[in-house]
Image (cartoon, grey):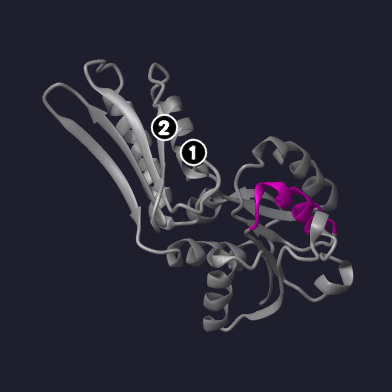
Amino acid sequence: MRIVIVGNGRMGQTVAAQAESRGHVIHAIIGASGNESGRALTAERLRGADVAVEFTRADAVVANLERLIEAGVPTVTGTTGWQKELPRIEALVERRNGALLHAANFSVGVQLFLRAARDLARRFAGRPELDAFILEEHHAAKLDAPSGTARELQAGLREADPRRAFPITSVRAGATPGNHTVAYDGPYERVTLAHEARSRDGFAAGALAAAEWLPGHPGVHTVEDMLFGADG
């Protein structure tokens, strides 16, 4: 495949390296400079690309997605913090018969962790003697807090156990790629379920798998659709 990488930060560079090691061609790498409001994403520059992988910032992602979808390029994005604009982007995908896959976290382990956490919440429902909370830890340079994964985790837990708030505590320090923990704490014991990322490679591998899957799947998808199917 010929892949466009939008965003030349650490995630974009990791995806590009993995893509090349798997025999794909990097059609273009487009950084922030010169791409204000997506203006570098021209039809001419995107011509011949099979798919785009977008990891940028919340203030840039929507314009990038609009340009990519208008150009007919299936797009995978891992940028967070733009979900309030999702209905508008979904409508554009439908009008253009495009393809978009979005996720806060592309790690296969995280997706299984989220499912296990929902099951755990259902089992702990109705036990008020245990306080429940979420702890998420990321490197000092991560801008958004809570993380998109923590918000997704909280939403899933609240759906499984609506009587609990599942408050989130965020830590931004050091070089941690990303740790997420849900805990139930009582006077005599604590139960925890956690996912710890050792590097960005797991996120990049999942994003690349999504990029390989998305062409030929029109519509708006999540990483759960790719991993587990519509009925998963």
The residue lying toward the viewer, choosing from 137 and 230, is 137
Give the residues drawn in magenta, as a range.
Answer: 56-70
Residue depicted at x 52% and y 82%:
21
Q: Secondary structure at mark 1?
A: loop
Viewer-closest of 146 and 175? 175
Residue that carries the numbered disc 1 in the rendered image: 146
**Which residue type carries mark 1?**
Pro
* Residue type indicated by callout 2: Ile
The label number, if any, that marks residue 168 in the structure image? 2
The disc at residue 71 is none
Quadrant assignment, res 69: bottom right
Q: Are marks 1 and 2 in contact (CB under 8 Å)?
A: yes
Q: Main secondary structure of the magenta part?
A: helix
- Disc nearer the start of the sequence (1/2): 1
Is residue 66 magenta-colored?
yes
Residue nearest the viewer, comparing 191 with 48: 191
